[in-house]
Image (cartoon, rainbow, N blue to C red):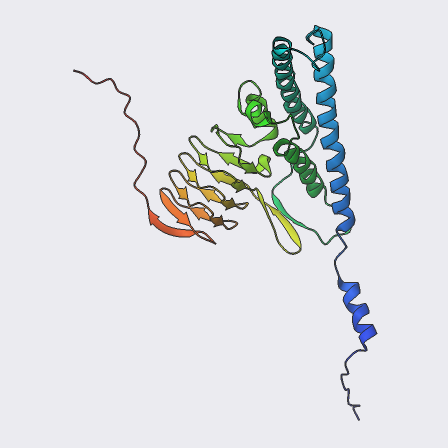
Amino acid sequence: MVDSVQETAPAPEAAAASVGSSRRPDLGGALRTFLGIDIAVRLFIWSTALALATAAYTALGAWPEGSLIGADLGQAWHWGQRLTGWVVLFNLIYVLELIVLRLPIPTPKEGRYPTTERKPNMQLLWSCLVAVLTKARYQAPFPGFLVFHFASLPPLVWLMGPIFGPRSKTCYVTDPQIIDPHLITLGRNVVIGFNTTVAGHYQERDAVVFKRTIIEDDVLVGGHAVIFGGVHIKAGAMIGAGAIVLPGTVVGPNEFWAGVPARKLRDLSPATAIDTTPQRA
């Protein structure tokens, strides 16, 4: 004789315990640690640049004589010129610090890394450290307003590209938010609009996926657009302002995409090259 088995609903306490035991680890502690490291690194870079610039000015005897307080126009003008030079030196040192601090950090590899494991994944750790330096690059406190300029001009651009990223053949007028710069490749004549974000990752519920984003030559990306990791935008394409290009999207050559999420709207005529051949009279 087989006894009948009746399924009964578990008691609320047992259900709560069951749910609690299946939850993934609380990430609050890791995120607080990240914020703490972010504070420490940002203050270290800023204070060190401040100290080195000030010490260099003192060693060179570059500080003006007399106090700025109560100075006449001539003396105040002299102070203004010297302080401007000090700000330039501060920003140069700031960018050099970013490069030097990036050197010992291993470059994170592409892949899918779960966030549910209790033991931290080293690739995620390296990515967090790069993210700290990336935040320091884009969110530099006053007087770090020239960080973008010095990072984009020779000779520092020759170090920033290979060491810090992104690998780019393009110069910008405005500074786009390029997250995961080590996973971003940009071609020539790429125009990226104001407040656009280009990422080399995207986040799933239980994992973070790192994948290279490639933008080829002669691409125009409108302002306030978002381009996720794994996107490949081919030569001559255009992304409309405010578009969100989903992970893994491939935009074909000379295509116009726009919308949320972005989709192909039409084909564009190929970009016309400028004829530089001398013309005979």
> How many marks on residues?
0
Q: Position of residue 196 (x, y in %)?
A: 51, 41
- Seen from the viewer's position, the closer of residues 258 and 25 is 258
Q: Position of residue 226 (x, y in %)?
A: 51, 45
In the rendered view, tell whether residue 76 sits above or below residue 173: above
Q: Quadrant of residue 212?
A: top right
Q: Position of residue 42 (x, y in %)?
A: 71, 32
Which residue is located at x 74 percent, y 19 percent?
51
| Residue at the farthest left position | 281
Which residue is located at x 39 percent, y 34 percent?
218
Q: Quadrant of residue 10?
A: bottom right
| Residue at the farthest right position | 13
Image quarter in which the C terminus is found: top left
In the image: residue 277, left or right of residue 260: left
Q: Quadrant of residue 280?
A: top left
Which residue is located at x 74 percent, y 41 percent?
35
In the rendered view, tell whether residue 104 sits above or below residue 67: below
Q: Position of residue 50 (x, y in %)?
A: 72, 21
